[in-house]
Image (cartoon, coloured by chain):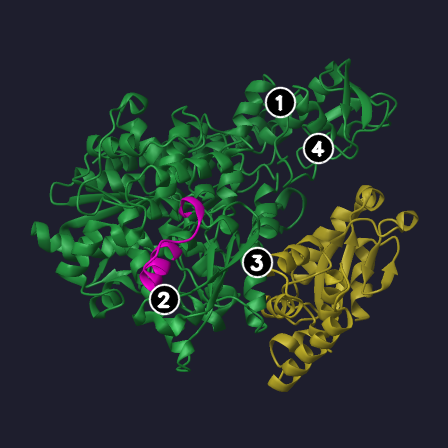
Chain colours: A green, B yellow
Amino acid sequence: MVNLTINGQPITAEEGTTIIEAARRHGISIPNLCYMKDVHKIGACRLCVVEVEGARALMASCLATVSEGMVVHTNTEKLRRIRRVLFELMYSDHSEDCLSCSRNQNCEFQAMGKLLSVDSSRFEGERSSYHVDASVSVTRDMSKCILCRRCVTVCNEVQGVGALFPQHRGFDTEMAPAMEMQLGKVACTFCGQCSIVCPVGALKSTNSEHKVWAAIGDPNKVTVVQVAPAVRVALGEVFGLEPGTSVTGKMAASFRRMGFDHVFDTNFGADLTIMEEGAEFLGRVRSALNNRGAVLPMITSCSPGWVKYVEHMYPDHLAHLSTCKSPHTMLGAVVKSYYAERIGVDPKDIFVVSVMPCTAKKFEITRPEMQNGGYPNVDAVITTRELACMIKYAGIDFVNLDDEEFDNPLGMSTGAADIFGLTGGVMEAALRTVYELVTGRTLPFDGLHVTPIVGFERIKEAALKIENPLPDYSFLDGVEVRIAVTSGLAGAKILMDQLKAGNSPYHFIEVMGCPGGCIMGGGQPRSRDNDIRNKRLRGLYTEDEGKPLRKSHENPFIKSLYDEFLGEPNGHKSHELLHTSYVARGKFNQMTEQTFVADAKVIAKIKTAAAIHDQAKAAISKLRQEEAASPKVFELESENRRLKMELADALETVDILKSVFNK
Amino acid sequence: MNPESAENTCTVIEREHAFEQIANVIDLYKGKEGSLIQVLHLSQKIFGYLPLEVQQFIANEMDIPLATVSGVVSFYSFFSTEPRGEHTIRVCMGTACYVRGGKKIVEHLQNHLGVDLGKTTPDGKFTFEIARCIGSCALAPAMTIDDTVYKQVNLNKIGRILEKY
């Protein structure tokens, strides 16, 4: 232990602790914009500098560690002055369209300005050029980037994808894919983890709210909404509820108040997935044991970011992926076939909206494979964050809403479906059903939780021995089923490299693209609570434990769906509607023509207006500087007039666009 | 190897040979951390410049993300993603050279060569760049062509210097 003084307060801290952490533990918070505990500390923003008595220079407290007898000051006049200048320098090259920015009032940079009491910059000069790169899932707007590099750390070290990296140098630096390529054209998995950590609006999920409102407002459309399990334990955070609070009932009530015609639950799709995936797994094992050849291990395919990762990085191993679609596309396919028939509506008039904790799902629904009969299974995906915005827009008093239920039949679900939202959950749900199907007995674990695969370790494994199976499954007698679970793509890489080398000891692997599973997905509310993962995890397990039915095959509406419509799991109709195929893309997206660049026209037009505003401002300030040089003044004045006219034109365009939106 | 030929006249065999050589270089540095810059440096020597396909080749062979390779290439001004001229002219724009007329030399060369900074003349002879202090401040304004330093350059001298190439 080390003894030191921070702001006159004697403190003991463990050796190796950074000053910022030692201070935080004793209730002293030091301003910072780039630091992320245990994940990212590179001292890029410099706002966390502190004065250490006797030290030659100021120290970045996120990097400097404590030492014996150290005397630290975190709030001196010198530091306040320096932080102010640092902030103003960053602000001088930051786009000022806060009012139209999706991060307005939820922006770490804006909050920092408030904290430091700075609302303008004394520095005027050259500005970085505007550049909006919209993919179907994630949008990059580099005019807002403050170069903190959190996204680079998350993309490279946490996820091991490496789509983003600092390009160029100095003033021209931008966090971007290689060689100025667009995100939609490179091996980005669209996991959206970058959009979670971005302190500003530089990386965000591509917005679909307008599209959904338009469908709700269209009298010719029957709107169907469904919501993923992980959303229900995170949405409440936006409305000030404790993380992990389940808001399932309030959410269902909000959907009706927003104007959706049918309110369903992706959980039903999850139960359906278990039926299909379980049958597929048993089929593969049966073939393997009968020497008919089968690709094992089988790997789950619910996470579209993970699927895209395999398609890019391991294009030769696509056969290991389960052919099952993800739960929400399964449900979409059932809505536009079975349910459409039931309510007598043409599938072309049905608009399915999925509320997801995920940005990659926005990409998934644009895949040509996710269509049946010429209609996309799902028409729009909004993230948890977008749903929160829409609920607020609709003026709903969310916290005080009375709970409501989902509509039947596609809103009914078992506890097994709830845990689809967390790492280990899909595997556990599958085992609950498969084990019972094979042996006729319940899974031999306390409270049905497969304890070895609960928690957040990078790679979790377990083995389950099958004894005394039912006669139909006698070929499985004595077989030990080995399973592995991982979340986060860096962990997935370890398992895939093992598989590629031919050393994979497993039969069944669950992979979720985001670390911790969907509860920590790229579309979830941002949080600075370090315990957020555990709270959301607890929330979902509680939801599961509170349900009377906890195994997917016990869902009565699943049973009737098979009886009335699908026939049997993995049957002909299932294959047509609920299963899919994959595309070899390659590390550089070189194996396919497919790209996922969004139509950025609208965004680009709005940006032009902002850019012209900036140009005009720059011209005016230049004018001020060069007032003495009178011949230039005349020239600049005319240029200024021209720019003002252009600005007026652009503003008019914005007005027109706004009126188009309001229609 | 003439870098211009890499783009225009290089045969398939020459290209394959170049990639083979780059693979050898990567092999040489295999397992050594922080060797990307060395690999890129030698690859540029072999191929003449570092276009996307060469960067992809290196990223694939070294098993690092393409964005990382491109990040390093775009960071250092000595790496080029476009074909380079036979000779590289670098006009020093360090403080001393700037004060003594470096900017005028740049403007003059722009007119004389007919290309912008960072570009290569259409005949593939010269690539025209600026340098940030080459350490010859006493000889300001200075410029280099390949490895030769020209001291106290003025506008009258430029024509004669370029004639040598």
Q: Which residue is mark 1?
A: A122
Residues at discs 3 and 2 both on one chain: yes
Q: Which residues are magenta?
A: A431-448
Q: Which residue is mark 4?
A: A62
Is A2 one of the magenta-colored residues? no
Horizontal relation, residue A249 to residue A25: left or right: left
Of residues B2 and A247, the one drawn nearer to the viewer in this rendering = A247
Labels 1 and 2: the sequence-earlier one: 1
CA distance for labels 3 and 2: 57 Å
Vertical comparison of A45 with A445: above or below: above
Q: Residue furthest front?
A: A468
Within 10 angstroms of label 1, few (less than 14), some, or many (20 or more) residues? few
Residue contact at pointers 3 and 4, CB within 8 angstroms: no
CA distance for labels 4 and 2: 57 Å
- Label 2 secondary element: loop
Rendered image: mark on residue A179: 3
The residue sitting at 69% across, 75% down in the picture is: B23
Labels 3 and 2: the sequence-earlier one: 3
Residue contact at pointers 3 and 2, CB within 8 angstroms: no
Labels 4 and 2: the sequence-earlier one: 4
Of residues A435 and A232, the one drawn nearer to the viewer in this rendering = A435
Within 10 angstroms of label 3, few (less than 14), some, or many (20 or more) residues? some
Q: Position of residue B96 (x, y in %)?
A: 85, 43
Labels 4 and 1: the sequence-earlier one: 4
Q: Quadrant of residue A38?
A: top right
Residue contact at pointers 4 and 1, CB within 8 angstroms: no
Q: Quadrant of residue B41?
A: bottom right
